Amino acid sequence: MFEKLDAYLEEISHFLSGREEREEILSEIKSHILEKAEREFGGANEESLNKIIASFGPARRVAENYFDGRQIIAPAYKRYLFRYTSFLFFCHFFLTVMAVVFKEDFILFPFLFMPRLGLIEAVMYLPTAFLTDLGIVTLVLYLITQRKKEIKLPWPKFAVDLDEVKKPKRPIWTYVLGLIPMLAITDFGIYLYAKFQTIFFVSVNFANPRPLFLPEAGRRYSLIVLAMLAAGTLSLLVKLFTSSRWVDVVSNGITLILVGLFLRQPFGNPFAVSVPEGLLPKIKFGLTFTLFFIAVVVTIELIRSVIVVGRKKLVK
């Protein structure tokens, strides 16, 4: 009957959920508009409705007025958002590392399927996995909230509530004490690489050094290790000026990428010195285990930092 009014109500409906509730709200809004037009202008027509609609304001704001005080996720469940997201993402990350290192498919039925991935694919996959996990948990908590029933969500008693973990404030001098040797080691490593194209040696006689690895392998391994040292040094330097958890997030993320690069390097026999053939598999296993252990430790700290940052943002 009134095109402007119908279009306005249609626009408001896009911001409302639940068919029965939506129809009830739209009917109420329509009645208010028509009553106001009758009261203030003596009747409803296109001109009077245009003025009333303008006074009501944007459709989104009108719709939001009907949802004041309603929670998408109940406050009692918000702390579970990052608890469950972190748990799912840890499973995703663990399987991703396994898929990259062992080049196998992994299935955690019925929740996860992890195809065999290369390093680049894994790096691209993990952010998507995190968003997916966050979306799934958000949807479940939203549905629980909408039921308006008291539901006790499970969480292990021994689990640490990461949003309550406060990072202890360390004196600046502790960072300085860590920064000085890291800076010295990094600078010395860069000096060695600039002069000899490697930082790994069998002998320390710099007049006639004996490199541990063949030239190509020595360059690759040296650059990765130097990048790790540089990342750690830069992290300590930044911490002199800020205690933000984002420093740890970025530093741990870079470390994981570099560990992955190290694991992706072809091993074969990279040594420039004589190594018994039977010892090579043991060296490879020991190196892989060590790097994998480092990756797990760094991952736990990374997830811990991400959760704390996320909880702070959620509180704000």
Image (spheres, rainbow, N blue to C red):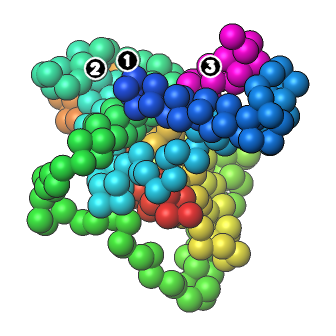
- Tell me, for residue 114, which label it has, or none: 2
Amino acid at pointer 2:
Met
Q: Is residue 55 left or right of residue 235?
A: right
* Residue of label 1: 117
What amino acid is at disc 3? Glu
Task: Give the structural element (helix, strand or loop) at label 2.
Answer: strand
Q: Which element carries disc 3, helix, strand or loop?
A: helix
How crowded pointer 1 is (Cα within 10 Å; few <14, some 14-19, many 20+) is rated as many
Q: Provide the residue span drawn in magenta.
A: 1-16
Q: Position of residue 108 (x, y in %)?
A: 15, 25
> Of discs 2 and 1, which sits in the foreground?
2
Disc assigned to residue 11 = none
| Percent coordinates x, y for residue 109 in the rendering | 13, 22
In this orientation, which residue lies closer to the viewer: 208 or 82? 82
Of the image marks 3 and 1, the number of the one nearer the N terminus = 3
The reply to whether discs 2 and 1 touch (Cβ–Cβ < 8 Å) is yes
How far apart marks 2 and 1 lie (CA) works out to 8 Å
Crowding near the residue tagged with mark 2, few <14, some 14–19, many ≥20 C-alpha atoms within 10 Å: some
Q: Which residue is mark 3?
A: 10
Q: Quick one: SS at disc 1? A: loop
